[in-house]
Image (tube, helix red, strand yellow):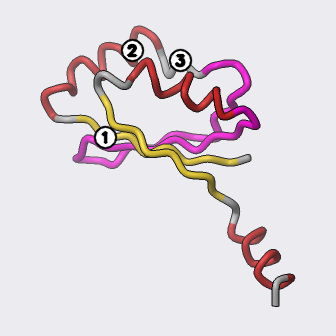
Amino acid sequence: MLFMSTYTFEPAARNEVVKRRLERGTGVPQGLKVIGEWFYLGSHKGFILFETDDPKCIMGMAMPWADLMKWDTVPVMEIEEVLKLAQSMK
């Protein structure tokens, strides 16, 4: 299943976020496949699109960053799938 995690951090945490990311990478747990990650330019916010069938992997990705960032994770579907599903529910 696809998920999107949006993360935000306070400006004061920027240096520690960059340092930790350079040292540790994303820390993606086994069982989670990252599709891509994007950062909102000029802000303190980004998002990661990933795939997993194990919700524990979501916590495994977010918890090491919980002291620096706020995470919001939601399940998502490609629009083509949503439209097919909507059409079949008529």
User: Magenta residues, as a range?
Assistant: 29-54
Q: Earlier in the sequence, mark 2 or mark 3?
A: 2
What secondary structure is marked by label 1?
A: strand
10 Å neighbourhood of mark 3: few (<14), some, or many (≥20)? few
Which residue is labeled 3 in the image? Answer: 27
Separation of marks 1 and 3 at Cα, in angstroms:
17 Å
Q: Does 27 appear above or below 4? A: above
Left or right of 76? Residue 11 is left
The type of residue carrying mark 1 is Thr
Q: Quadrant of residue 69?
A: top left
Relative side of 80 to 57, left or right: right
Q: Specify the quadrant of the image occupied by residue 88.
A: bottom right
Residue at 51% x, 45% y: name it: 73
Measuring from the top left, give residue 41's x and y in whole percent.
Answer: 29, 47
Q: Which residue is mark 2?
A: 22
Tell me: residue 21, above or below residue 58: above
Q: Which residue is mark 1?
A: 8
